[in-house]
Image (spheres, helix red, strand yellow):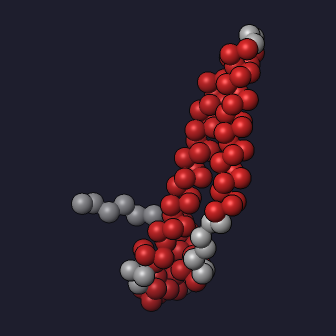
Amino acid sequence: MEQTQLPPKLEKQILLAVLKTIDKKPSVPRKLHWRIIDFAIWVAVGFFLFRAFSSTGWFQALFPFAMFGFGMLLMFIYLRAQSIVQWPLIGRYLDRSKMEARVRELEA
């Protein structure tokens, strides 16, 4: 498999971000917080559906775009929550010393 080269500046930014994330204490989203977000999302969906099927005009034209954006937001929230939960497992297998050495090499 051929490996593509990243620009040194981008590689350094990525490595520094990973090192910073390794140092953070893992945080687990609070259940109440996510329940409130879920409730707000369902209220918004209900409002959009009610509005879409009870009127005509510009709202119906924008409805598909609003639902697409809404789906993207939901997927972002889901993936973010999954990465927070899975990071402690993945972080253990990263070699910190090699990353720090590469950052020093890029700074030189």
Side of 12 relative to 97 (left or right):
right
Above or below — where is 21 with respect to 72? below
Residue 19 percent location from the top left of the image: 54, 79
Q: Position of residue 103 (x, y in %)?
A: 52, 81
Residue at x 53% of width, y 74% of height: 18
The image quadrant of residue 13 is bottom right
Work out which residue is located at the far left of the displayed protein and give it.
Answer: 1
Q: Of 19 and 32, which appears nearest the observer?
A: 32
Instruction: Name the quadrant of the N terminus.
Output: bottom left
When the figure is inspected, residue 43 is found, relative to residue 78, above or below; the finding is: above
Question: Which residue reaches farthest top?
Answer: 56
Front residue of this view, candidates 87 and 97: 87
Q: Could you tell me which residue is drawn at 38 percent across and 80 percent down?
A: 93
Horizontally, residue 3 falls left or right of residue 58, namely: left
**In this orientation, does residue 8 appear?**
no
Q: In the figure, 34 relative to 16: above or below?
A: above
Q: Is residue 51 visible to us here?
A: yes
- Residue at x 63%, y 27% (from the top left corner): 65
Residue 45 position within the rendered picture, expressed as x and y whole percent measured from the top left? 67, 33
In this view of the protein, which residue sits in the foreground, 11 or 64?
Answer: 64
Residue 9, position as x, y percentages in the image: 56, 69
Which quarter of the figure has residue 71?
Answer: top right
Instruction: Work out which quarter of the rendered image holds the C terminus and state it.
Output: bottom right
**Residue toward you, 108 or 101:** 101
